[in-house]
Image (tube, rainbow, N blue to C red):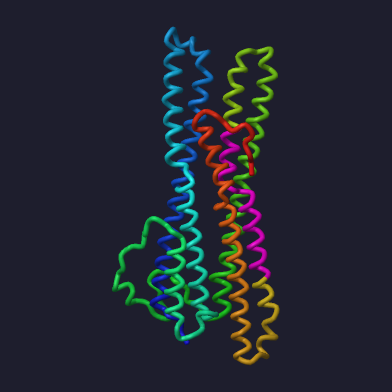
């Protein structure tokens, strides 16, 4: 029995739309955090420079103080209006929905339970509708239907790139191992970024300490201490918002588990050749169920990390604190 290709393509089209919303929302939030932190840091630096602005003339301190007030006001506004729990929730929910729809599409394309009957299309449509309803997202980015494109759906063609696997080999190559490669590549990029930011944070913090000590002999260096302290806090806040460390661990574990599943399937190829068609089909269903289960657990763990109210609140408070010129007392690098 062939999968319900028209329904599969439509659900996949919706999945792509939500993935686009997630990517755009994440990019927007990262940009908002960056500018809020940068403006807060600049404003704090200007505020710390007020006592030394006499070098600019009699009005120097007043001008620098005014600039500091304006920049911190803008930074605070950015932090309060753009870096919020609701905006964070919107893109993370869109990501969760996209990944859930992607999983169901692949299960349907491989005709595994509950998509192994004549009602597979109905089940997929109902599941997709339920997922979207439960996410409570406040915007529907699905582009208008194109009847001509929908008419192109067939067993060999998907206008929007929905899966068309014909065998276990196709599934492993196009789904499981491709996803594992993505996890490994992303984890490596995150590791490189985390190492760089951590080293930068260490250097800035150490500089603040050294300048504080030397400031007892060179008074001019003391003016840099609060600026460097604020910079260290801003870097720590950025690390906190990115969830790099837990994401690296999660992605590495998931990639390893998927690779092991693929290896186990290859190792048992000779044994499967001796099976009846029904048993081979059951083995394939077990493979798909196992791999999709691994990716589902990754999505659930990712959701738990990014939707944790305390962590979200702490990350937002860190950014908003820097933006207002008041860094948290004990910034976390978690």
Residue extending farthest to the top is 58
Residue 258, image x and y in percent?
Answer: 64, 68
**Residue 156 placed where, x, y %?**
42, 79
Query: In this picture, which residue range is highlighted in magenta?
Result: 233-260
Q: Does the stretch in magenta take in 256?
A: yes
**In the depicted view, which residue is nearer to us: 331 or 216?**
331
User: Quadrant of the image for the C terminus?
Assistant: top right
Q: Nearer the viewer, residue 196 or 48?
A: 48
Asked if the magenta segment contains residue 284, the reply would be: no
Magenta residues, dominant SS class: helix
Q: How many callouts does the rendering have?
A: 0
Instruction: Indicate left or right for 280 with 69 as reference.
Output: right
Farthest residue toward the bottom? 276
Relative vertical location of residue 239 with respect to residue 51 in this rendering, above or below: below
* Residue 146 to residue 203: above or below: below
Q: Is residue 5 above or below residue 141?
A: below
The residue lying at 49 percent from left, 77 percent from top is 109
Who's the residue at 42% across and 39% down the image? 81
Residue at horizontal 57 percent and vertical 65 percent from the top: 179
Residue 205 coordinates in the image, percent (x, y): 65, 30
């Amino acid at each position: 029995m062939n999968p319900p290709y028209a329904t599969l393509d439509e659900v996949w089209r919706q999945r792509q739309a939500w993935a686009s919303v997630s990517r755009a929302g994440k990019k927007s939030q990262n940009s908002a955090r960056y500018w809020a932190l940068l403006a807060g840091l600049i404003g704090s630096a200007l505020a710390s420079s007020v006592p030394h602005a006499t070098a600019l003339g009699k009005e120097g301190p007043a001008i620098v103080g005014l600039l500091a007030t304006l920049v911190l006001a803008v930074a605070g506004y950015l932090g309060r209006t753009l870096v919020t729990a609701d905006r964070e929730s919107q893109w993370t929910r869109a990501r969760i929905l996209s990944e859930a729809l992607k999983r169901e599409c692949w299960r349907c394309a491989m005709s595994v339970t509950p998509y192994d009957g004549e009602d597979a299309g109905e089940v997929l449509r109902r599941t997709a509708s339920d997922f979207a309803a439960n996410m409570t997202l406040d915007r529907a980015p699905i582009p208008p239907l194109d009847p001509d494109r929908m008419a192109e759906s067939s067993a060999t063609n998907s206008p929007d790139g929905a899966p068309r696997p014909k065998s276990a080999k196709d599934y492993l190559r196009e789904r499981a191992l491709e996803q594992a490669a993505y996890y490994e590549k992303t984890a490596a990029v995150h590791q490189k970024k985390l190492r760089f930011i951590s080293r930068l944070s260490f250097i800035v913090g150490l500089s603040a300490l050294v300048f504080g000590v030397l400031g007892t002999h060179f008074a001019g260096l003391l003016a840099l201490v609060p600026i460097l302290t604020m910079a260290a806090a801003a870097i720590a806040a950025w690390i906190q918002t990115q969830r790099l460390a837990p994401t690296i661990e999660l992605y590495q574990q998931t990639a390893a588990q998927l690779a092991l599943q693929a290896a186990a399937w290859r190792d048992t190829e000779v044994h499967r050749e001796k099976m009846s068609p029904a048993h081979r089909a059951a083995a394939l269903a077990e493979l798909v169920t196992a791999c999709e289960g691994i990716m589902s657990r990754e999505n659930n763990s990712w959701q738990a990390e990014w939707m944790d109210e305390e962590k979200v609140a702490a990350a937002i408070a860190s950014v908003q604190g820097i933006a207002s010129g008041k860094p948290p007392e004990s910034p976390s690098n978690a």
